[in-house]
DNA sequence: AATATTAATTGTCAAAACGACAATTAATAT
DNA sequence: ATATTAATTGTCGTTTTGACAATTAATATT
């Protein structure tokens, strides 16, 4: 029997930065940690990678367990592996970010876990290196969203242009001109205008749009250019 | 003493996709695996993550050991963690890609390891999931290089525009118009024209350029747009 | 019924970037 | 002096961009 002689073995975990959008602000979903050390402190949703699952599987499992949601948009970010990052025992953690429709989550709310949405800029201090993970996730989200139409994952199936607009501004932490944004986003050809209007925000109402699923699938891996130029 | 009760522990490794450029083609550096299983088969440069080092540290150590080079451009790609990816024992591997100046390497050649450059498109079959890793690395390199001026890392300090041109074509596996490329790359303001010429390639000779280190440091994290538009 | 209010929607224009295209130049070789 | 070869550079019409505010569609108010 071949063996890899006496190499050290480690725990491997996953941690998920769950982003949501309430129509006004970007939020993240945090939980109160359920085990020592740092029990009852706010932390990211996480868990250990089981013997018969990949890290991707584990992240999906953790999300399902804690939010009740399946098929969530999930993207591997990077690994966190400083030898001393966990004070108890060496644990490497694979960071993921997830994009979920905040309203779907509320419908699925699972009270077994004390989870709570926080404004991205008003979140509590987190345990270990989770603060760094959140910062990294924001950066990664920004990059990804500049080239790929993924922010739709945080909106309901029917959404309006003003909603999208605010979401893009939140993610990029900048103001975007209404006219230019509208022009750019419609020119992708990814949006289908519906007859119905959303009247909750104004008297005039804003037309609902939905994603063109076919084009979305085709373009999800393509380079787009969804943000104003950040070159200068 | 707090413990994470009976969670499974795994081996954690790093594997590096080392890219180089010989002036004509994109290449990767492979080694003959030195341990069972699959001993003497071609594989990526890799090694286990030691007890007192992070995966990043481990990748740098492995590169130093196998190529003699330090301070190499190294970027974490993703983790490979399918439960059965290593037939002997569960091992998760963190994939990195490295960009090195092929000539520097030749100067540092370390004969302790049977390493060899292969044309990216004529490489041998690799062990385990290393073929997938190479494919992923190419994709990631393409993305990164479209926004960030990192391909210079594969060129000598003094390089010519035609060299850069070929390198961009190789990485993106496409033809790029000479005039448009030249216009775009010089408009970044990252290049400093030298008085000297490289006469090896032609009678006329091509002017050498070097990187503007200051601007490079400032722009390395900025969005550029170094590739022809891939939107359509 | 007319008017006020509010947010959504749309238009213009000058500047910049783009993509497609080939002629000119600087050196060496004949 | 001429031929050869690869490097370098220029034009132009089209598209995209960014900066700018007026118009529209509905409800609420008078």
Image: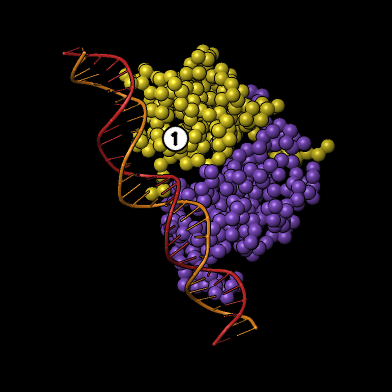
Chain colours: A yellow, B purple, C orange, D red
- Total residue callouts: 1
Tell me residue B125's x, y (percent).
76, 47
Q: Please name the residue shown 56% across and 25% down the image.
A: A72
Displayed quadrant of residue B55: top right
Displayed quadrant of residue A200: top left
For residue B173, say whether it is visible.
yes
- Figure check: B41 above or below A30: below
Which of these two is toward me, C4 or B118? C4
Tell me residue B17's x, y (percent).
65, 49
Which of these two is toward me, A168 or D13? D13
Chain at tag 1: A
Look at mark 1 in the image and give the residue it sits on: A185
Q: Secondary structure at mark 1?
A: helix
Displayed quadrant of residue D9: bottom left
Tell me residue C19's x, y (percent).
51, 52
Tell me residue B92's x, y (percent).
67, 36
- Figure check: A119 above or below D28: below
Which of these two is toward me, A204 or B105? A204
Q: Please name the residue shown 67% across and 46% down the image.
A: B134
For residue A129, say whether it is visible.
no
Q: Residues within 10 Å of mark 1 (few under 14, many from 20)?
A: some
Q: Please name the residue shown 66% across and 39% down the image.
A: B93
């Amino acid at each position: 029997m071949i063996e890899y002689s006496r190499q050290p073995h480690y725990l491997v975990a996953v941690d998920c930065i769950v982003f949501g959008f309430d129509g006004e602000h970007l939020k993240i979903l945090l939980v109160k940690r359920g085990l020592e050390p740092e029990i009852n402190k706010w932390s990211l949703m996480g868990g250990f990678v089981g013997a018969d699952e990949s890290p991707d599987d584990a992240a999906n499992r953790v999300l399902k367990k804690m939010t009740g949601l399946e098929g969530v948009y999930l993207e591997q970010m990077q690994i966190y592996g400083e030898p001393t990052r966990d004070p108890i025992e060496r644990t490497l953690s694979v960071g993921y970010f997830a994009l979920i429709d905040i309203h779907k989550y509320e419908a699925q709310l699972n009270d077994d876990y004390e989870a709570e949405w926080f404004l991205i800029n008003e979140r509590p201090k987190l345990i270990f290196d989770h603060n760094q993970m959140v910062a990294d996730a924001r950066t990664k989200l920004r990059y990804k969203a500049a080239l790929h139409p993924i922010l739709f994952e945080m909106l309901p199936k029917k959404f309006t242009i003003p909603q999208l607009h605010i979401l893009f501004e939140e993610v990029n932490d900048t103001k975007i001109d209404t006219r230019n944004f509208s022009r750019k986003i419609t020119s992708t050809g990814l949006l289908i205008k519906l007859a119905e209007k959303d009247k909750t925000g104004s008297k005039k109402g804003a037309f609902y749009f939905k994603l063109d699923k076919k084009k979305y699938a085709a373009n999800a891996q393509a380079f787009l250019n969804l943000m104003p130029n950040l070159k200068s």
